[in-house]
Amino acid sequence: MLIVANWKAYVEDLPKAKGLVAATRRAASRSKATVVIAPPPPLLGALAIGNRSRLAFAAQDISRTTGGAQTGESTARACMAAGAAYAIIGHSERRAAGDTNGIVAEKLGHALAQGLIPILCVGEKERDPAGRYLAFVREELRAALEDIAQKDRTKVIVAYEPIWAIGKHAKDAIGPHDLAEMVLYIKKVLAELLPGNSSARAQVLYGGSVEPEDARSLTAASGIDGVLVGHASADSRQFASIIKELS
């Protein structure tokens, strides 16, 4: 089980961040799950460098550049040097800010080139009765992976985050049955894109209003391999409860 905490910009000062890491570390020590924290970029190095716990760290995003005269950019190599082992790529909020499928593919390539484990986010804005959202998710996966070497495609973790479910309460998020169908669909698409039988080992996470109230039901019946948690991950009690529920 992989549990990823995307703090987004909810945590803005170092003392609070250190306290949240300490609380997450305690919760993770009682779990067999792999727990990954994605802090805001300015806090990544302060929290991740020298980390000797079971926690791992992720970049919330990386640049499409590889260095040089690019003020304000956070390259894959710089994030790796700051202690990141993972990188979230193509999050819906970054796509809304202008990341096209082509940009997402570039970032994915840079992450893999530097040895970061990419968490590729895909997901539809809305569900239409005709099922066009399935083609939308398929295209996001194809566009991201088609220019990646076959051997590297197997390293990519997919996070399904239906945009319509983000920021909602647990009761308004996706149900286990619908999520199970989507996981099967994503793995079917991955079977077409990944070499051999490697799609059977592909990890698919779910992100979209993951809270203590729905964490267990979503994972128990859907076949997902973990969760990508947003706002609840910046609350030490809520996130500890999620880790406990998934243990």
Image (spheres, rainbow, N blue to C red):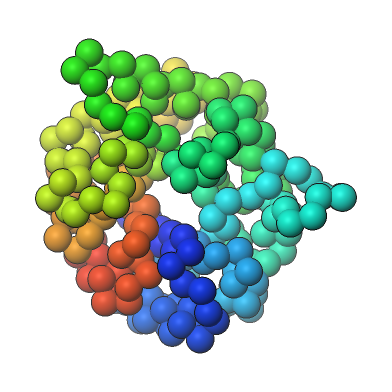
Specify the farthest residue to the top. Answer: 130
Q: Quadrant of the N terminus?
A: bottom left
Identify whether 2 is placed above or below 178: below
Q: Residue 33, position in %: x, y?
A: 34, 62
Q: Residue 227, position in %: x, y?
A: 33, 52
Instruction: Examine the rendering and report whether any part of residue 63 can be seen.
Output: yes
Specify the farthest residue to the front. Answer: 97
Q: Is residue 70 shown left or right of residue 159?
A: right
Q: Residue 246 sits in which quadrant? A: bottom left
> How many marks are shown on the rendered structure?
0
Q: Residue 74 sits in which quadrant? A: bottom right
Identify whether 198 is placed above or below 37: above
Residue drawn 51% across and 38% down? 95
Identify whether 123 is placed above or below 81: above
Residue drawn 41% across and 79% down? 20
Q: In which quarter of the image is the C terminus?
A: bottom left
Q: Is residue 205 shown left or right of residue 77?
A: left
Residue drawn 64% across and 50% down? 62
Q: Residue 10 sits in which quadrant? A: bottom left
Q: Residue 189, position in %: x, y?
A: 39, 22
Residue drawn 47% across and 27% down? 141
Instruction: Examine the rendering and report whether any part of residue 56 can be seen.
Output: no
**Residue 225 versus residue 79: which sits nearer the camera?**
79
Q: Is residue 78 shown left or right of residue 67?
A: left
